Amino acid sequence: MAQMELLLPKMGESVAEATIIKWVKNEGDAVEMDEPIVEIATDKVDSEVPAPESGVLLKRLVNEGDVVAVGQPIALIGTAGSAVASPSAPAAAQVPAPTAEVLNTLTAPMQEAISASSGKFYSPLVRNIAKTEGISINELEAISGSGKEGRVTKADILAYVENRTTAPAPSANGKASTPVEVANPSPKAEPSSRTIPQRPAISIGGNDEIIEMDRMRKLIADHMVMSKHTSPHVTSFVEVDVTNIVLWREKVKKSFEQKYGAKLTFTPVFVEAITKTILDFPMINISVDGDKILKRGNINVGMATALPSGNLIVPVIHNADQFNLSGLARKVNDLADRARNNKLTPDEIQGGTYTITNVGTFGNVLGTPIINQPQVAIMAIGAIRKKPAVIETPFGDTIGIRHMMFLSHSYDHRVVDGMLGGTFVRRMADYLEAFDLNREI
């Protein structure tokens, strides 16, 4: 019988692993070429792995909830010459067994992932992190897991490593006794005397409803807490007169759509202004690595996008400074549309160096956004409103109705001081206010 391995496919340059979310096919099921077999997730992007050929799903090699490396076999498929067993046949006869040699090869990582002392499951990734950080098996077993059936996930062990100052010393009966000091697990880790705050006790009333967070909401929650824990946030605000932009867009939006086949929103104008400002102040386009500053060579602007589910995702416009305004408009529309339809690739949410978020979409005039780590700054765009404003003219000041909005610039005070953070947002406002009302499309 012809057998082939179904490998976890490469999903992007920066993606090394994925989580098995749901098996669409059962062992013994017939599969057609390009028919989805399993649903996987990487960071915030969910996708499906299709069958490379028609045949029969002989065996699943990984379970739902497992973290699997790119290129690792996840299933065996019987191809031409394979026969699907009769539904009335016993279960053991429905799925032709792979050879012992194949099974030994393919299940070796899973065998290594089982703790001999307790039988608890630890993925190869978690065990590798534990080994690298010098975490003993007794210490590992004490970590509370948030994965399926209480398994320790990558996020669990990394959070443990970040907050690790003491480790339980095993007693004679194998249980933890008095904590003992341990060395810093990484040369980049900084010693800390702070205590980890305990979650408050929550009382549940008879009319309360308990709603489980979905996977994306858990990721967002963890990322937001991590960002506030990592960076001291400061926010500067500037009010901007965007009347020229509003009038220009109203004048050209129909002809723009006819010419380029894309709707003209305000977002590409804001992205263009951001890229100009970053070119003026490149020390905003950085990341922090311990006590080192990493100055980014590319300007990759993320744009926070609300999803129909209420969750949030941040697709990235890579090399945004290399697009003209029409190119930015098409790129913005494409990424936003595919984000809402769950069609983004993993690479399209990776590598951002600066992020904008449009809180004005919800009618908000101001926001204090949380930095999208490992970036050091984020800009919130407020709602555009008509307001009376002072207009300076060669003949004196007058009062007029203007289109005004606020920019809110949050930045990491470890490396961005008030002068740079405040000057940056003021410069962006200057670019927006100087927008040419007669600009050609």
Image: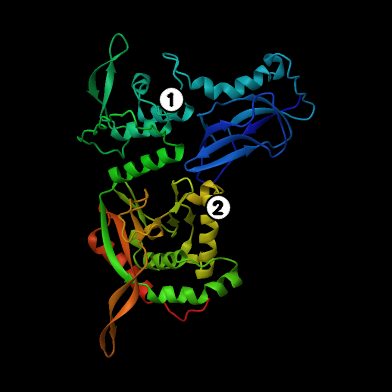
Q: Residue lying furthest top in this view?
A: 173
Q: Is residue 55 visible?
A: yes
Instruction: Give residue 88's position: percent from left, percent from top.
Output: 74, 16
SS at badge 2: helix
Amino acid carrying mark 1 in the image: Arg
Q: Is residue 96 visible?
A: no
In the image: residue 108, left or right of residue 371: right
Vertical position of residue 175 compared to residue 324: above or below: above
Q: Which residue is mark 1?
A: 151
Q: Residue at x 28, y 83 (%)?
A: 392
Of the pair 328 and 255, the residue shown nearer to us: 255
Q: How is the image coloured?
A: rainbow
Q: Residue at x 38, y 75 (%)?
A: 243
In the image: residue 351, left or right of residue 239: right
Q: Earlier in the sequence, mark 2 or mark 1?
A: 1
Amino acid carrying mark 2 in the image: Arg
Instruction: Give residue 5's position: percent from left, percent from top.
Output: 66, 30
Closer to the eye: label 2 or 1: 2
SS at badge 1: loop
Q: Residue at x 64, y 29 (%)?
A: 25
Q: Residue lying furthest bottom in this view?
A: 395
Residue 227 placement: quadrant: top left
Q: Residue at x 31, y 40 (%)?
A: 188
